[in-house]
Amino acid sequence: MIAAEDPTELAGGGIEQLKKADIDVEVGLCRIEAEKLNAPFYKHGRTGLPWVVVKWAQSLDGKLGWTNPPADGNWISNEQSRADVHRLRKRVQAILTGIDTVLADNPRLTVRIAGRPIEHPPVRVVVDSQLRMPWDCNLITVPEAPTIVATTAHTAQTEFAQVDKLTSAGVEVMPVPMADDRCDLAETLTLLGARGLQQVLVEAGPTLITAFLKQKLVDEVRIYIAPLILGANGNADITAAMNTLTSALKLNNVNIDTFGTDIRICGYL
């Protein structure tokens, strides 16, 4: 009994070999469950595109950051939720963010799980259409994982000094086509998929998150909701950005879990 066929070019023809050996083979038992369990593999195998997970943490009033952070950091979610995010990071092959997040938060975008060294850390990808990447940011100075800067082909061809500086710092500059004066997100994913990256985690601000959702490029959503009402002490309002969505998006296969006092909502689009 085989649940589903291998959709990739690496399939070894095992089903036909079994049949030639006069072994009865039935394909399709629990196919839906099997493909759901291995959804990133099947999507990449059939389309060449990565499975895209969009994740964010927010307060009850939809803020993604603090205006005046408390002494223990700028986090919205608690320690248990952040540990869950690192387990998610370990699962994917790339973590994608926008240049605005780099400038505002200076993230490392690495997997940090105590006692568990990561042999193949996920690639860090920054969407930076104008090559504003600062030289002292953690994505350059913390070489725990490879970093790719996706920029428009026009910028890559005209900003020679910036490209040379990034390249000399060990950062790969990946030119992508332009759409509305920005990096074409669909083409960016196509290029990442062509590198064999099956899963991409988007950890970004409201504008880039909404752009992925608006263009229907998202397969899975993970939202961490903290019991906070930030009001004027909060910034990066996700609800304001999503007001630009012209149609409702409904999550399927929804799971709701708690991490301490935080709530995590997961679902597929």
Image: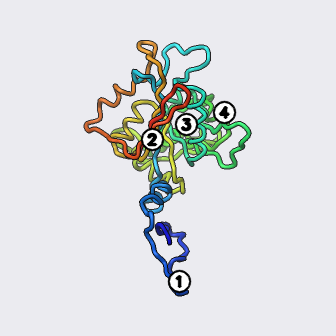
Q: From what the image shows, is residue 199 above or below residue 265?
A: below
Q: How many marks?
A: 4
Q: Nearer the viewer, mark 3 or mark 2?
A: 2
Residue 139 on image: x %, y %: 61, 35
Q: Residue at x 30, y 29 (%)?
A: 243
Q: Nearer the viewer, mark 4 or mark 2?
A: 2
Q: For marks 3 and 2, give the CA distance.
A: 44 Å
Residue 85 on image: x %, y %: 56, 36
Label 1: state its secondary structure.
Answer: loop
- The circle drawn on residue 151 is none
Q: Amino acid at mark 2?
A: Asn
Q: Nearer the viewer, mark 1 or mark 3?
A: 1
Residue identified by numbered label 4: 141
Residue identified by numbered label 2: 255
Label located before the other in sequence (1 or 3): 1
Label located before the other in sequence (4 or 3): 4
Q: Amino acid at mark 4?
A: Thr
- Quarter of the rendering containing residue 213: top left
Q: For marks 4 and 2, give the CA distance.
A: 37 Å
Label 3: state its secondary structure.
Answer: helix
Seen from the viewer's position, the closer of residues 5 and 93 is 5
Residue identified by numbered label 3: 162
